Image: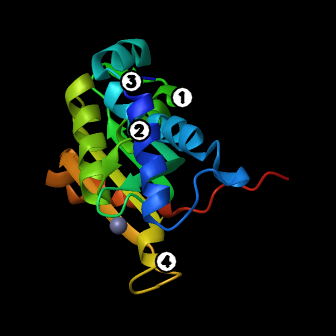
Amino acid sequence: MRGNNEAVQRLVKKLLVELGEDPKREGLVATPKRVAASLAYLTSGYRMDLNTLINEACFAQETTSMIVVKDIELYSLCEHHLLPFYGRCYIGYIPRGRVFGVSKIARLVDMFARRLQIQERLTEEIAYAIKDSINADGVGVMIEARHLCMMMRGVEKQNSMLVTSAVLGVFRSNPATRDEFLSIINRPNMQSS
Ligand SMILES: [Zn+2]
């Protein structure tokens, strides 16, 4: 938590007043404090260091086979409305000597998701971070997400899902590699019996 917590609390209190609410009402008394803490968490990605995360996350492994991590849960905030978008992220990459620990790749996703985002940029930032940090031969990232700013307001399209993808390196230059990635992520998950 940074030192601006109290300033955010004051602004949230002011916002409640401007929305026509009474910030002294019992249910709202602690709301500015809660919102400030919640926003600090939801934007904590700004205060995470990519190099630290990557140094902890990677280890040497001599493989050049495709590694795919599916169904990484993702929660972010759209920068246009400050409303959540949420969904799943799929990542594939072909390493060149260094691989990511599986849990750490989820933290990498969180690092970029816990910022004000648009889904297209989030997808690219994750892809470039993986490509650059381990010098991967290629990276593919796909995100499918629902946006509350579309579901609750505006067009009110409750069931539409926004799908974005970014492909780098051999995922871009070699259609067979890209197809392999797509077929893996589209394969049904194993049933736990
Ligand atoms: Zn939005």
Query: Residue 33: image x %, image y %?
Result: 56, 37
Where disc 2 sits, the SS reads helix
Quadrant of ligand 1 in image: bottom left
Label 4 Cα neighbours within 10 Å, binned few <14 / some 14-19 / many ≥20? some
Q: Which of the two labelled residues, at mark 2 and mark 3, occupies the earlier sequence position? A: 2
- Tell me the CA gap for discs 1 and 2: 32 Å
Quadrant for residue 132, please give it.
top left
- Identify residue type, mark 4: Met
* Residue 62 appears left or right of 27: left
Q: Pointer 3: what residue? A: 99
Q: Pointer 2: what residue? A: 8
- Identify residue type, mark 2: Val
- Tell me the CA gap for discs 2 and 3: 39 Å
Q: Residue at x 53, y 81 (%)?
A: 159
Q: Pointer 4: what residue? A: 151
Q: Residue at x 25, y 54 (%)?
A: 166
Q: Pointer 1: what residue? A: 103
Tag of residue 118: none
* Residue 63 appears left or right of 102: left
Label 3 Cα neighbours within 10 Å, binned few <14 / some 14-19 / many ≥20? many
Front residue of 184 and 151? 151
* Residue 75 appears left or right of 49: right
Residue 42 visible? The answer is: yes
Q: Which of the two labelled residues, at mark 1 and mark 4, occupies the earlier sequence position? A: 1
Q: Which of the two labelled residues, at mark 3 and mark 4, occupies the earlier sequence position? A: 3
